[in-house]
Image (cartoon, rainbow, N blue to C red):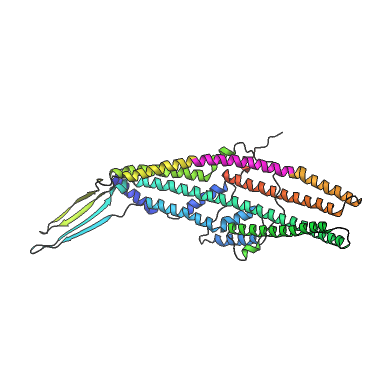
Amino acid sequence: MTPMRFAPAAIAIAACASVSPRESFVEVSHTVEQRNVPTLHWDQGTPADEQVRTRVDEMLHGVLSPEGAVEIALLRNQGLVATYEQLGIAQADLVQAGLLRNPTFGARIGFPIGAGSTETEFSLAEDLVDLFTLPLRGRVAAAQLDAAKARVGNAVLELAARVKQSFVSLQAAQATLHMRQLVLEAQQAAAQLRLRQYTAGNVGDLELSQEEAFYQQEKLNVVRAEAAVLHGREQLNRLLGLWGEESASWRVAETMPELPDREPDLDHVESLAVGRRLDLAAAQKEVLALEQAASLGGVTRVFPAVQAGVSTRRDAEGTRVVGPDLTVELPIFDQGQARAARIAAELRQARAKQQELAVNVRAEVRELRSRLLTDRAVVDHYRKVLLPLRERLVQQAQLRYNAMLLGVFQLLLARREQIDAYRDYLDAVRDYWATRADLERAAGGSLIATLPKERNP
């Protein structure tokens, strides 16, 4: 297309471009939905906003599920809302890249000294280099917009993972507090019994001090467990973007979620992560944008600025002269070598960071995959071996106590050890779900899609 034909088309495209990031936001929402994340909503004063607020209010006055907590965080977390604005910035840059510079209007008046008439000159010029580099600038801005979309999508997935981890940590803290309270009640009863025995002269100072120390330690453990629950709630409140009455209205289930019957097929999770990680996609788009910027820099280095237009002048004799006007910037002092070197260095830097990120992604996924399998093995060992063993020990201690072959304090000790083992089991379940959420984040989305298909018998 010739410059004369290209200019009207470029102006028409620029006039039709929209600075609204709505289309880009919808695309990001579709991307994260494919990774098993709830539909995103950006509060921008639409009628649907009121429906969203009603939905959030309903969830906050009931028992929150992990999925519900993620949904609220995606709607209310202001850090994520701030991240959405990257789309608006990148969209505005894309529109700006598609706009021609405003033409330059010049005027000059010459007043005669002595006899003669006033000279006037008017000119109108447009930068031709700006016109010819318009497509390149558009490609740079488009690549930057794609990078912004990927970064926003990655922020969504990271927030979802953090919410899931915080949610299960709170559940574990609540369950641990409940266990600690049971141990405290048992230890309080043991301390009171030991005091009665001491008063009756059946035990000495050593036994009394031992039970009192156990009781005081359990009181401290309950205080720490209560602090852990409070910390877990406030941590989740921050992620959900809640404050005031809303921060105290919600609650989570006391029981922790059961482990799935089987794990997804994790043999190819490394390649899955490389193909789905949005931060890696953002790095690739940033490299592409810098490559386009390097091409643009090569063009503007030869001709930094070329202005062409028309000028009209009336001389002192009253003659009007009209003709073309051309202004060329001569690259004598600044030949663009510094700008070209900077872009080249930034491009090499971006490529190195992209390769580093790819290596880190692979290593992270491999580590989390191994940790997930280990965490599951630990939970299974507690559930199938240690907890049943502790249950049998308590039953045997109860039988011996009933037969007056074992003292009450030995029975309480067996019960306390059983509760401690169950508390450790809860910690193992928490670690499993936290690692699973981290692996889903590292893999770029839900692991459910990686489950192998069942074969027909």
In the rendered image, which quarter contains the C terminus?
top right
Residue found at the far left of this picture: 115
The answer to whether residue 328 is left or right of residue 368 is left
The answer to whether residue 363 is left or right of residue 299 is right
Residue at the image position 81 percent from the left and 52 percent from the top: 413
The location of residue 92, given as percent across then percent down, is: 42, 54
Q: Main secondary structure of the magenta part?
A: helix
Residue 324 higher or lower than 246, as above or below: above
In the rendered image, which quarter contains the N terminus?
top left
Q: Nearer the viewer, residue 208 or 386?
A: 208
Which residues make up the magenta segment? Answer: 356-381
Q: Nearer the viewer, residue 90 or 4?
A: 90
Q: Nearer the viewer, residue 404 or 376?
A: 404
The location of residue 210, given as percent across then percent down, is: 79, 56
The location of residue 346, given as percent across then percent down, is: 40, 44
Judge whether residue 253 can be spotted in this image: no
Q: Is residue 301 magenta?
A: no
Numbered label tally? 0
